[in-house]
């Protein structure tokens, strides 16, 4: 709850002008969002998808990760989060 409050303060104070972030590329927008307190890749991708309507954003939580590993990476032992994100972007494209 502390991070949520801190992020709300940053946005309310104007330190983070979310409207001005709209024209940013997906990569830059994700980076900006991840700089907010408590925002990681999954939350950044959720915000990108639902608030900024970036349909290429692909939030990966524990359950999505499990499905991707079981369905598409059956024989691989070491699969990183970045590998899963890259796979999802390439395989599902903007329909992720």
Image (spheres, rainbow, N blue to C red):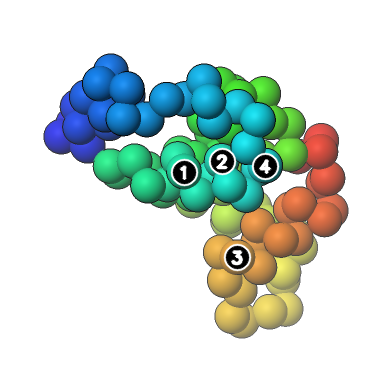
Please name the residue shown 46% across and 43% down the image: 32
Q: Quadrant of residue 14?
A: top left
User: Badge 4: how crowded within 10 Å, few (<14), some, or many (20+)?
Assistant: few
User: Badge 1: how crowded within 10 Å, few (<14), some, or many (20+)?
Assistant: some
Looking at the image, which is closer to me, 48 or 95? Answer: 48
Residue located beneath label 2 in the image = 29
Residue located beneath label 1 in the image = 32
Please name the residue shown 76% across and 52% down the image: 89
Cα distance in 3D space between marks 2 and 1: 5 Å
Please name the residue shown 75% across and 60% down the image: 87
Considering the numbered disc 3 on the image, is that residue within a helix, a strand or a loop? Answer: helix
Cα distance in 3D space between marks 2 and 3: 17 Å
Residue furthest to the left: 2
| Marks 4 & 2, CB-CB < 8 Å contact | yes
Q: Position of residue 83 (x, y in %)?
A: 66, 68
Cα distance in 3D space between marks 3 and 1: 18 Å
* Of marks 3 and 1, the one in the foreground: 1
- Tell me if residue 6 comes above or below residue 93 in the rendering: above
Q: Earlier in the sequence, mark 2 or mark 3?
A: 2
Q: Quadrant of residue 30?
A: top right
Q: Position of residue 16 (x, y in %)?
A: 37, 30
Q: Which mark is residue 25?
A: 4
Cα distance in 3D space between marks 4 and 3: 19 Å
Residue located beneath label 3 in the image = 82
| Marks 1 & 4, CB-CB < 8 Å contact | no
Q: Is residue 69 visible?
A: no
- Tell me if residue 60 comes above or below residue 7 in the rendering: below
Looking at the image, which is closer to me, 62 or 80? Answer: 80
């Amino acid at each position: 709850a502390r991070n949520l409050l801190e992020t709300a303060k940053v946005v309310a104070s104007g330190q983070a002008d979310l409207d001005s972030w709209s024209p940013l590329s997906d990569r830059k927008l994700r980076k900006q969002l991840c700089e907010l307190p408590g925002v990681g890749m999954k939350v950044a991708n959720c915000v990108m998808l639902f608030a900024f309507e970036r349909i290429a954003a692909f939030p990966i939580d524990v359950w999505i990760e499990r499905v991707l590993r079981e369905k598409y990476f059956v024989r691989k032992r070491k699969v990183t989060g970045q590998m899963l994100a890259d796979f999802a972007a390439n395989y599902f494209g903007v329909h992720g």
